[in-house]
Amino acid sequence: MSFRTSPALGSARAGGPPSAVDYVEDVSPGSGALPPRAWYASSDAKALSLDGAWRFRLSATVDAEDESFAEEGYDAAGWAEVTVPGHWVLQGEGAFGLPIYTNHLYPFPVDPPHVPTENPTGDHLRVFDLPDDWPSEGGAVVRFDGVESCARVWLNGTDLGEFKGSRLAHEFAVGHLLKPKGNVLAVRVHQWSAGSYLEDQDQWWLPGIFREVTLLHRPAGSALDFFVHASYDHVSGEGTLRVDSDVDGRVLVPALDIDVATGEPVTALVAPWSAESPRLYDGELVTEGERIPLRIGFRTVVLEDGLIKVNGKAVLFKGVNRHEWHPEKGRTLDLATMREDVLLMKRHNINAVRTSHYPPHPAFLDLCDEYGLWVIDECDLETHGFTEQDWRDNPVDDDRWTPALLDRAARMVERDKNHPSVVLWSLGNEAGTGRGLTAMAEWIHGRDPERLVHYEGDWNCRDTDVYSRMYADHAEVEQIGKELDGGTLGRRKLPFIQCEYGHAMGNGPGGIADYQELFAKYERLQGGFIWEWIDHGVKHPELGYAYGGDFGEELHDGNFVCDGLVFPDRTPSPGLLEYKKVVEPVSIEGSDGTVRVTNKYDFADLSALAFEWSYQVDGETVEAGTLSVPALAPGESADLKLPEPPAHLDGSETRWTVRALLAADTAWAPKDHVVAWGQFPAVAGVRPSLVPSASPVREEGRITLGPAAFDGRTGALRTIGGVAVENPRLDVWRATTDNDDGTEWKSGLCYSTLWRTLGLHRMRHRLVGVELESQALVVRTRVAPAAREVGLAAEYRWTSDGSRLKLTVSVTPEGQWTVPLPRLGVRLGLSAVGSGAGSAVDSGVASGVASGVVSPVASAVDEVKWFGGGPGEAYPDTRAASEVGRWSATVDQLQTPYLRPQENGARADVRWVEVGGLRIEGDPEFSFAARRWTTEQLDAATHLTDLVAGETVWVNLDHRHHGIGTASCGPGVLPQYHLLAEPAEFSFVFSEVSG
Ligand code: IPT
């Protein structure tokens, strides 16, 4: 195949320059820019970075200022400065305007292609000298890697042209204009343009030159562009390489002894590239003018048997959607931050990224090639706001916009085509349906038949090679999995992916383990991409992190922009740890002294992993050793005998834990990094027992029972030994999560609305009676909301053996309950005696302290120890990563700092917990949470800075929690995780901890 140029690009301007402002509302992509090409850094051609401080002037409208600033000799001494790359609204402390967050609503009237007269316009000026060694021969281009949303460019007073397409590269030929000293580069950037209609992604609107600006020397005889074709034949083990270039040259790959002319195919035995084993071969394209470094990965992507296959195998995407985000710099990311994303993904078993919803900084794709991630590269296109008018006037179904769409498609494909990590091109996101999309798909298929095309928004899959959906619920996904051949639509024969699922907003997402079971079960289901990677919180001096509305926006979508698996500072949230466990590439299950290890990689055998077993007695490891596991091939299992278990004390609970660790350092994690693990019980423990022997005694207005004292009239617990206790009483409320607050797509139900309407957040406790039995104090209450007939009859039965105190709670629902309960348990307050500060385990989970947003207050009650699930939080449908063991943490470390405060931090499957001088054992196992504020305060807070620590630590001991689900966008809690209002009984044994 010969080198081909792109469509409708680089057109010379006809009929002279546009008027000063017409181009802003022109649907065409622009004029004057060079055709797009591969992005690379030449080994020898000079490059001059133009990043740094630029002179900056902000105007309220497009035409408030004339163009004289672009002339040489213009005096900009009175101007402000901004840093390039950067967004001006994130600089200047508000003096340059503020960010706006909307999900899909356009923050301006939908009147395409017109934009508001109030159109913040930033004039940028940079004067530069050429380095002394800048060659006098050849040409030069100035390259803009990303400018939002529309820019006009002048060099030394000459108008070069103007462009749109914010997250795409644009280059202008400038060699003929350069001089050794005092070059003046002037860039006028408009926040709004016709292009804004194509960039309605769910994110902050952030104008500016937000990616690098570079001057590149283009030596005579250098290639305009080149295309690396590197395929792999999995049957023969041969790779075929052909590099097309518009100028002739040689292609060198020393490790393969390749020295071949451009355009000539050459075959060699190679190790293929995959996300699991990202083998890259260093090479060079040598033309007369320059040497271009190549990093070649041999791999073949095909659609075969209704499956996406790479190198002959169907792949399972364990992916995330990644927006570019930095809490202070917005979409300006440096290399270290990009690398941090990739390393975090690799360390959490993620193998795929959808670059939602625009091509990322090109260096990110280099990292994906190097470390190994499958990439769906998505075009900078979304017209979601047209959904508000039933998609009338949608640009993707209007031929006038098609050149702009083709320009965007070409700028993505040409820039990124040489990355082996890119396996699918995506036309964009949420742009409805239309002819423009078809034109894009046709062009892409023609230009790059060696990759597949993705788009979610057209379920007929007219233009795509994969049936993609977002947030389909489990039942529908299962149905799709089963319908491999059935149905009439072409899509039924296509492979299926969920390009978005598991909405990671706040606490959650719940139910992803259940999805993974389906992906594993049905071949056609090739996995999915969690929405999304990172919370787009903006660092804020008063609020910690700001979200929608915090900048006084007229229209906004609140904290819907904070829905990531990592917090804005990239601390993993519990959702990421859950995902890591759910998608682990090795499964480890066991019973009866045998462990079954299964390789769930698509390509790799298990030779890179070492296995360790350990044996726990009551959560403490008493013996450990290595386990020899054969280098199983993908899909293979082995049953391995575990050693004879050590003797243990009667009544203690024992279990095996087996871990798969990296056997050696890798590029992305050190030796001993845990890749996968499994735990299974050996001998069940004995439940806490207490034989009542003490009798309740009434004395001077109080009742005593063993170590405890109660209020004489109400029977409310006051103290246990020296520990003051704010009465434990029934609690059903939780500070609603973002998922509780969401509306389930299918049922249309919003549980937090149902709960609040019923009044579960304002339950009243009516004392029914206090009875002293010979060996028990029995307190009866009825717990119910005002205005409703439903209620819960609660009986608290207190007994003691003289030193310990047991509470048995029996709950009987009364009336017609039609909603599940948020939680069911008791809440108590502790404030008196503490066990003192101790060392806390590194939980690997973000704590308020770690992110510096919750100020730890010195309090008597601080360190918490427990035996149960940990180290992080877990709820009924988010508990895959919860490991049974002995854990400790301070109260502050128990908090998960969701940007909008909500229920968090519960530890599941707890046998006992020690907090505030008390040891609390449960029967059955329970869930606990401890915090320095009440649930009501947590519920009322809008930002973490609203949470003020008090003296009392509030402890929730929960029998059960309602599940989490993912109704903040998509399906709700699966029925098996509902907490129904049903009769329940649960107990706790309290004792004082000495010391
Ligand atoms: C979906 C969008 O594609 C994504 O950008 C984001 O907005 C997400 O929702 C919610 O956070 S679109 C929606 C109709 C499911």
Image: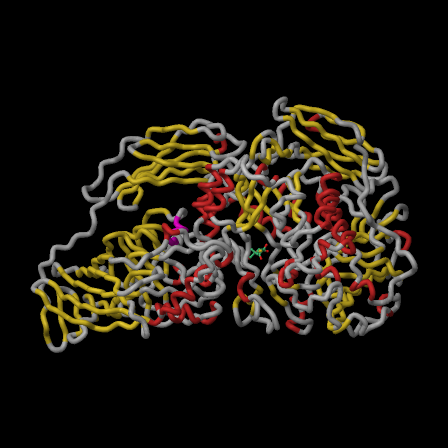
754 in magenta: no
**Left or right of residue 456: residue 259:** right
- Span shown in magenta: 874-879
- The answer to whether residue 389 of the structure is visible from this angle is yes
Query: Can you give x and y, in whole percent of width and height, for residue 202 in the image?
Result: 61, 59
Taking depth in this image into account, of 434 and 372 the one nearest to the observer is 434
> Horizontal and vertical percent for residue 706?
13, 64
Expressed as whole percent of the image width and height from the top left, the position of residue 622 reads 29, 40
What secondary structure is the stretch in magenta mostly built from? loop
Q: Nearer the viewer, residue 875 or 308?
A: 308
Closer-to-camera residue (834/907): 907
Q: Which scheme is used to colour this image of the protein?
A: secondary structure
Give the residue at the far top of this rendering: 236
The residue sitting at 35% across, 59% down in the picture is: 820
Q: Is residue 878 magenta?
A: yes
Please, is residue 927 above or below residue 677 in the view?
below
In the rendered view of the protein, which quadrant contains the N terminus? top right
In the image, residue 163 lies at what x, y percent? 79, 57
Question: Can residue 371 be seen here?
Answer: no
Quick one: quadrant of the C terminus?
bottom left
Q: Is residue 127 above or below residue 277?
A: below
